[in-house]
Amino acid sequence: MPRGEVIVNKELCKECSLCVVACPHGVLGIGKTINSKGYHSVEAVAPEKCTGCTLCAVMCPDVVLTIKRKSPERK
Amino acid sequence: MKTVFQKPEAMTDVPMHYCPGCTHGIIHRLVAEAIDSLGIREQTIGVASVGCSVFAYDYFNCDMQQAAHGRAPAVATGIKRVRPEAMVFTYQGDGDLASIGMAEIVHAAARGENITVVFVNNAIYGMTSGQMAPTSLLGQKTATSPRGRTVEEMGYPIKMCELLATLDGPAYLSRVSTHDSRHVLQAGKAIKKAFEMQQQKKGFAMVEVLSTCSVNWGMTPANALKWMAENMVPYYPLGVYRDVTAKEGN
Amino acid sequence: MAKTLMKGNEALSEAAIRAGLKAFYGYPITPQNEVPAYMAEHLPLRGGVYLQAESEVSAINMVYGAAGAGVRVMTSSSSPGISLKQEGISYIAAAQLPCVIVNVVRNGPGLGGIQPAQGDYFQAVKGGGHGDYHMIVLAPGNVQEMADLTTLGFDLADKWRNPVMILGDGILGQMMEPVEFAENQEPVNVEKPWATTGAVDREPNIVNSLDIIPEKAEKNMQALLAKYEKIKEEEVRWQEDGTEDADVILVGYGTSARVARSAMELARKEGLKVGLFRPITLWPFPEQRLRELAKPGRKFLAVEMSAGQMIEDVRLAVNGVSPVYLSNRLGGMVPTPEDVLTKTRDIVQGRVN
Ligand SMILES: Cc1ncc(C[n+]2csc(CCOP(=O)(O)OP(=O)(O)O)c2C)c(N)n1
Ligand code: SF4
Ligand code: SF4
């Protein structure tokens, strides 16, 4: 079970890749589907590696990403 | 699992018009997060300026006024003086604040006007498609400095934090950057602090946020962040230039 | 209340405070300096804010902010300063914000001089800043009206969500006359649900003049123009005297109207049939009434302290039915009743064409 989960609001993504660069674990990559604005939205290409650190979301200019994390006390 | 990151309440659902990778979007979110974390959304009146961020009034989920080019500090003064209980902020680019609006920002700072200023320095005029800004770096090529900015022709870039730090009026002056996640988190703290200053009636608070304009710089968004770290940060040193609360020893 | 002797600029300031003024933002310039001085002295002690801005540009933008935040606010200046305010006035008109702007006109163009003049007529009534907009322009003719039209100005500004200009001049500002203020005047409290007061239990309010979608911008312009049409229907004000039998009607506002009145009295003593028409609202201009007064055989004489500005509106109104002549002085010189009388005699005797 991954510790974190990244949820992508694909319609808002502009394919800038800042989140891809920001993620220390290579969770995100530019995907193949095109949104209505004509951008290839990012997607979690390695979701199992997500730690829920939020660094990708911190760098996203368009608030595309929502992050969930396992609360430590439930571990 | 618990949601640990989501769109702040102080932002609307309107998709932002900024170019892909434009750090204006990050800075908007930081402002909204600061408003949320202080619980001041219903008291806040924002002032949008003229520049790429002109539509900021559609993106912040609070009362907003749109000001003429450079005049946001005067508009904010007009609001704050008659509604001292409101939390008033301006959001201005470098052409807006450091060129056409130089008189307004200097005098608002000198008066110690109790407002929060978010100053987005991207070293270029974004909205009008890439002309030289007062903050463009020496050697920087723009639409109106095609051979690069030279001292002989255009003089030196203006360092606003340093300039305003010569005045007694400001309570808080800080320069931050958005070139990586660590610095974005620091920028968020500075912006929150600038609102807290207003809450505590300390007076004028400005955060200068170094920002990219990849489209007009002619780079990919990721390379623009790198260029900013390597060229802008050395010329515009990050740090706190004034903090009256630090003097008080808290 | 008993009458007190006051300067025009002071009477106007007192009236503004009594109308519930919450903020005054200004910048020094002669001949309106009594206004900021009065405000600085009295306004902070009576629940308002006085602030000297760094320029007229800043002052008018402070007015924009405060008006957008829903309070009664005002600025005052004189011609060169009013030129600097034009950008802000255009934004205020576009964002439909109520405020009062006082122009104690001096002679121009350029730095000009500090003597009374009326050369800002076009700037006041035809726009002045960029784009299609109008201010409501009120022209007081004495010290009592400096006060009364200021009170009215705030009411009209709120009623129509529109900037109002009080167009005075150095004489009206500086001269002293007895003036009376209404007893226990309660400032009218107008609801402003559009104002930025903090979005508590409602959607955010936005004060804005940006309109980049042409279809929408055209619609908004049409709504603005419809408002201007209603103002034209409801708010035209003027005063006339001796016009019924007049062969010559003198037309003038402000100080020029005072001169014209003296000229009319002299002319009547000579047996000349002369009347006076004094526009009180310069925008909307009382064109309908002037059109009714025009008839073959009747002549009009525009009396101005400008190079022939208001005369254009008189001509548009009478639309060729009557000839319109000009009697004016420039450069801060004030016409004398004798100047106007001489021109009137010439017109009556057919010595001008
Ligand atoms: C009085 C006036 N002059 C010029 C303009 C045109 N203009 C619009 S935005 C802009 C520059 C904005 O640059 P900046 O403030 O750096 O913001 P950015 O777009 O880079 O975010 C200019 C000159 C204007 N709108 N108004
Ligand atoms: S940072 Fe945001 S907009 Fe850019 S690629 Fe990632 S999710 Fe898309
Ligand atoms: S032009 Fe530059 S500043 Fe404007 S939205 Fe695009 S990247 Fe951002």
Image (tube, rainbow, N blue to C red):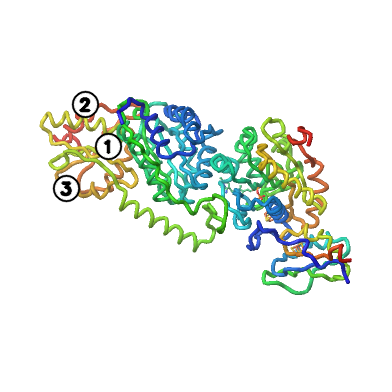
The kind of residue on which mark 3 rests is Lys
Q: Position of residue C281 (x, y in %)?
A: 32, 43
Distance in Å between CA atoms under marks 3 and 1: 19 Å
- Residue identified by numbered label 2: C338
* Dot 1: chain letter: C
| In-front residue for pair C291/C241 | C241
> Which image quarter holds the C terminus of chain C?
top left
Query: Does the CB distance between marks 2 and 3 fall below 8 Å?
Result: no
| In-front residue for pair B250/C253 | B250
Q: Nearer the viewer, mark 3 or mark 1?
A: 1
Query: Does the CB distance between marks 3 and 1 fall below 8 Å?
Result: no
Query: Does the CB distance between marks 1 and 2 fall below 8 Å?
Result: no
Residue A70, compared with residue C229, is above or below; it is below
Number of other residues with Cα within 10 Å of mark 2, as a class: few under 14, some 14 to 19, many 20 or more: some
Label 2's element? helix
Mark 3 or mark 1: name the one nearer the start of the chain. 1
The kind of residue on which mark 1 rests is Gly
| In-front residue for pair C232/C268 | C232
Question: Cβ of disc 2 within 8 Å of ligand 1?
Answer: no
Among the 4 quarters of the image, the one containing residue B237: top right
- Residue identified by numbered label 3: C295
Q: Residue B11: which numbered mark, if any? A: none
Q: Position of residue B166 (x, y in %)?
A: 71, 30
Residue B220, can we see it? no
Label 3's element? loop
Q: Residue C252: which numbered mark, if any? A: 1
